[in-house]
Image: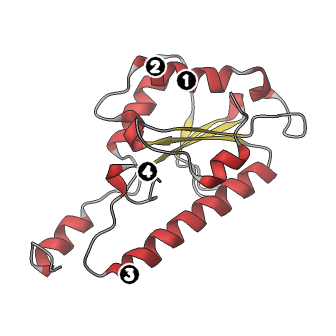
Amino acid sequence: MADIVDQKTRSRMMSRIRGSNTKPEVLLRKALHAEGFRFRINVKGLPGTPDIVLKKWNTIIQVNGCFWHQHPGCPRAKSPTSNTSFWQNKFAANIERDRCALLKLDELGWRTLTVWECAIGRAVARPLIDEVANFLRSPTSAMGHSDDPVRHGEIAGDGAEATPFAVAHRQPP
């Protein structure tokens, strides 16, 4: 299927997509700050340049866009129908880079929480804030990684699934 816009327009549209300080990231950061959590953003010295780093809680929060990180089961994760091989390679590289970054962060002793764009929506709902706060405040959040049973959590919107990596590392409810 051909693109519905010309190449120049598509290029302009794609160039405006941000890699950091996206709307979902900013919304979650504002909500966390309002709850009293203090953090650093886009820390380049850590694997994957995490979106939110809460050193006091030994936790990193990644806010993943459903399209760019191909959130399984999410309607926002549809692949484009044109130039499919490019997009498949692009998405596969993104997913592999995420997986490697999470593994390296785990090896360094960080706990990680992935919050998907579909869980945030246009505004951060109270249940989402509570779920993130509960993850951060769990008794294991300040412990070293050898005794910590919950190393990675994931929060997704309705109808979407956790990624295979997250399911393998998530403590059952």
Between marks 1 and 4 in the image, the one whose residue lies nearer the viewer: 4
- Is the residue marked by circle 1 packed among few (<14), some (14-19), or many (20+) residues within 10 Å? few
132 or 85: nearer the viewer: 85
Between marks 2 and 4 in the image, the one whose residue lies nearer the viewer: 4
Mark-to-mark CA distance, 1 and 4: 21 Å
Q: What kind of residue is marked 4? A: Gly
Mark-to-mark CA distance, 1 and 2: 6 Å
| Image quadrant containing the C terminus | top right
Whichever of labels 2 and 4 marks the residue nearer the N terminus, that label is 4
Query: Circle 1 sits in a helix, a strand or a loop, which is it?
Result: helix
Q: What kind of residue is marked 2? A: Pro
- Is the residue marked by circle 2 packed among few (<14), some (14-19), or many (20+) residues within 10 Å? few
Q: From the top left corner, tell me how far across and down residue 168 is, in percent.
A: 71, 49
Q: From the top left corner, tell me how far across and down residue 167 is, in percent.
A: 65, 46
Instruction: Say which residue label 3 marks.
Output: 86
| Tag shown at residue 131 | 1
Q: Residue furthest right?
A: 146
Whichever of labels 3 and 1 marks the residue nearer the N terminus, that label is 3
Left or right of 148 in this view: 43: left
Q: Residue at x 59, y 66 (%)?
A: 97
Whichever of labels 4 and 3 marks the residue nearer the N terminus, that label is 4
Q: What kind of residue is marked 1? A: Glu
Instruction: Say which residue label 4 marks.
Output: 73
Asked if the residue at tag 3 contacts the one at tag 4, i.e. Cβ–Cβ closer than 8 Å, the answer is no
- Is the residue marked by circle 3 packed among few (<14), some (14-19), or many (20+) residues within 10 Å? few
Instruction: Say which residue label 2 marks.
Output: 127
| Image quadrant containing the N terminus | bottom left
Asked if the residue at tag 2 contacts the one at tag 1, i.e. Cβ–Cβ closer than 8 Å, the answer is yes
Q: From the top left corner, tell me how far across and down residue 112 is, in percent.
A: 65, 42
